[in-house]
Amino acid sequence: MIKLCLVAVRYLKLLSLLFLLLVTLPGTANTQEPGDLRVITAIFPPYSYEENGEVKGVAVDLIKKMFLELGLTPEIEIYPWARALYTARNTPNSLLFSVSRSAEREASFKWIGTIFDFDVNIFKKAERSDIVIKGIEDLNHYSFAGLIGDIKAEYLKNLGVAVQEVALEISTVKMLDAGRIDLIASDRHAMNFRLSNLGLRQDDFVSVFKLHDLSKPLYLVSSMDTDDQFVETLRQALERVRP
């Protein structure tokens, strides 16, 4: 009888150790099923965009790799930026990428980790020799278009620049090409991608000024109610797959 009790005690100890090992392994500690999550991004090529009903992009590929590290394959939802930001702010247990960090957004999310660098420039048509930008104070002499709720548009408005806001950022490039506005602020990679999609020559558009205040990394973030252990699990997985 005593031997049986000793065997039982050892067995229970072994089970306890096995349980502790499992809950501390990456991808097993409080890893939520895809159905418990909403993973959201915005239309922001080449980082994220929709093609033939499939969500694609370099940021999308990275986030998918992160989830594969955890054995998860959640659906990625894609919306215009204003809707994506609103949904992530107001939906429990949601993730959002690619997000620029700012003082206004700091308390709205848990900042999981960086995914790509952001290279924000002011662009004009190359033929517009009348537009000269020597410093940031010159920007309010010209007309701009920007995406509703976007950090670039908000930054310019805070400088006193008049910004015509639109629902899709590709519209700003069309307006610039048509001469309806003087300048736009854009990430350099995103600008080149949009020009290519519109069949426009990159040489016909030039950067006249870099916005250093905005040229910072893009983030993966979560809603504030997301479990801290799960956020840490995501952070570690992102670090393992990030270039």
Image (tube, rainbow, N blue to C red):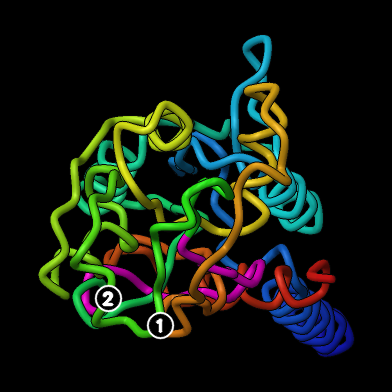
Res 76 → quadrant = top right
Is residue 112 located in the magenta-colored stretch of the structure? yes
Classified by dominant secondary structure, the portion drawn in magenta counts as strand
Image: 65 above or below 11: above
* Label placed on residue 182: none
Q: What stretch is highlighted in magenta?
A: 107-122
In percent of width and height, residue 112 lies at: 51, 74
- Residue that sits furthest to the top in the current view: 52
Q: In the shown orientation, is residue 167 left or right of residue 185? A: left
For disc 1, the marked residue is: 134
Q: Does the magenta portion include 59?
A: no
Q: In this view, does 55 lie to the left or right of 17?
A: left
Q: Residue 176 at what x, y percent from top left? A: 42, 37
> Left or right: 44 with respect to 74?
left
> Please, what secondary structure does the residue beneath circle 1 have?
loop
Count of residue discs: 2
Q: Could you tell me the amino acid type at mark 2?
A: Asp
Q: Do labels 2 and 1 touch, CB within 8 Å? A: yes
Q: In which quarter of the image is the C terminus?
A: bottom right
- Mark 2–mark 1 distance (CA, rounded to whole Å): 7 Å
* Residue at x-position 58% and y-position 69%: 118
The vertical placement of 72 against 133, above or below, is: above
Question: In the picture, residue 104 is in which quadrant?
Answer: bottom left
Image x and y of residue 38, in percent: 43, 40
Q: Which residue is more in the foreground, 43 or 15?
A: 43
Q: How crowded is mark 2: few (under 14 residues within 10 Å), some or many (20 or more)?
A: few
| Residue at left offset 26%, top offset 34% | 166
Q: Looking at the image, which is closer to me, 188 or 123? A: 123
- The amino acid type found where label 1 is placed reads Lys
Q: Where is residue 95 in the image (x, y as percent from the top left)?
A: 44, 53
- For label 2, the residue is 138
